[in-house]
Image (cartoon, helix red, strand yellow):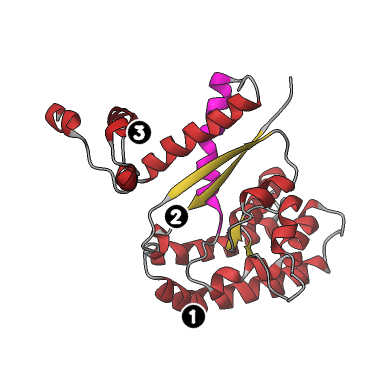
Amino acid sequence: MKQGRIWAYVRDQRPWSGAAPPGVVYRFSPDRKGEHPKRHLRNSSGVLQADAYSGFKELYARRADGSRQFREAACWAHLRRDFHDIWKGTKSAIAREALDRIGALYDIEREIAGQSSELRRAVRQEKSKPKVDAFREWAEQQLTRIPGKSELAKAFRYGLSRWPSFTLFLEDGRVAIDNNAAERAMRPIALGRKNWLFAGADTGGETLARAMTLIETAKMNGLNPEAWLADVLDRIQDHKINRIDELLPWNWKPGAKLENAA
């Protein structure tokens, strides 16, 4: 038996009222080497929000001309999780304060969910930036007071060492405070793993990735995946190739059979 990997790449502009429809693409690979996301994203650029996996480093690296393929946006939920685990295990007052400070940022995010990127940036500059600046100053002070090898110190250093990535959301209203959208996209894989257990082979993993891409993208667009897939499979053989985009989840309208059944 060997392990394979499923990668999830999510686009969801709904939090900032973007025009593009939401969707997720799953890709399978036989291992977790950084060459796989590099290949998956070779034709893409912009902002990439992910965890601190070292395999993404090349995607953020500066090119010879000083440009980057991707700007890195870090995830405050991952940082918060570190402090939460420490507080849960030790009831550390410092970890509790870190949670409260990060929680205040999430309170602001709830207020601007679904608003335009311009408004989100303006609110973040006014309300979030002072709190983020204060968090950094406070974190640096704590590092002078706590054991350097403690889990608490590791959590602070994790955030401070990647500070430009943690603050990118303040400069760009399109950037989320965390990558929970990708975390949610991986949940069906984690749940399914307990049910189907094995993909069988690399080809099985690739088939799974394609199927999950269709199913989860349909769900993100408010469709019943079973009804959408049944209708598309029934119609696609006779559908004009130059109008295939009509069957995509964000453009789809039920065929005659489904309309009559309704």
Dot in front, 1 or 2: 2
N-term-proximal mark, 1 vs 2: 2
Horizontal side of residue 88 vs 11, given as left or right: right
Q: Which one is in front in this view, the residue at disc 1 or the one at disc 3?
A: 3
Q: Nearer the viewer, residue 16 or 161?
A: 16
User: Residue 225: which numbered mark, if any?
Assistant: 3
Q: Quadrant of the N terminus?
A: top right
Query: Quick check: is 156 in the magenta stretch?
Result: no
In the rendered image, which quarter is residue 232 located in?
A: top left
Residue 248 visible in the displayed image: yes
What residue did someone put label 2 on? Answer: 12
Amino acid on which disc 1 is placed: Glu
Please determine whether, in this image, residue 139 is positioned above or below residue 243. below
Q: Which numbered disc covers residue 166?
A: none
Q: Which amino acid does label 2 sit on?
A: Asp
Q: Residue under circle 1?
A: 126
Residue 192 on image: x %, y %: 53, 26
Numbered range of the magenta stretch: 178-196
Q: Where, by quadrant of the figure, is residue 60 drawn?
A: bottom right
- Helix, strand, or loop for circle 2? loop
* Magenta-drawn stretch, dominant element (helix, strand or loop): helix
Secondary element under disc 3, as helix, strand or loop, is: helix
Q: How crowded is mark 3: few (under 14 residues within 10 Å), some or many (20 or more)?
A: some
- Residue 27 coordinates in the image, percent (x, y): 59, 40
Which mark sits nearer the N-terminus, 2 or 3? 2
Q: Earlier in the sequence, mark 1 or mark 3?
A: 1
Q: Nearer the viewer, residue 187 or 43?
A: 43
Q: Which residue is drawn at 87% across and 59% down?
A: 148
Most distant residue in the left direction = 260
Question: Which amino acid type is shown beneath numbered disc 3?
Answer: Pro
Calculate the distance from the C-alpha at mark 1 to the C-alpha at mark 2.
25 Å
Pick the residue in front: 185 or 67: 67
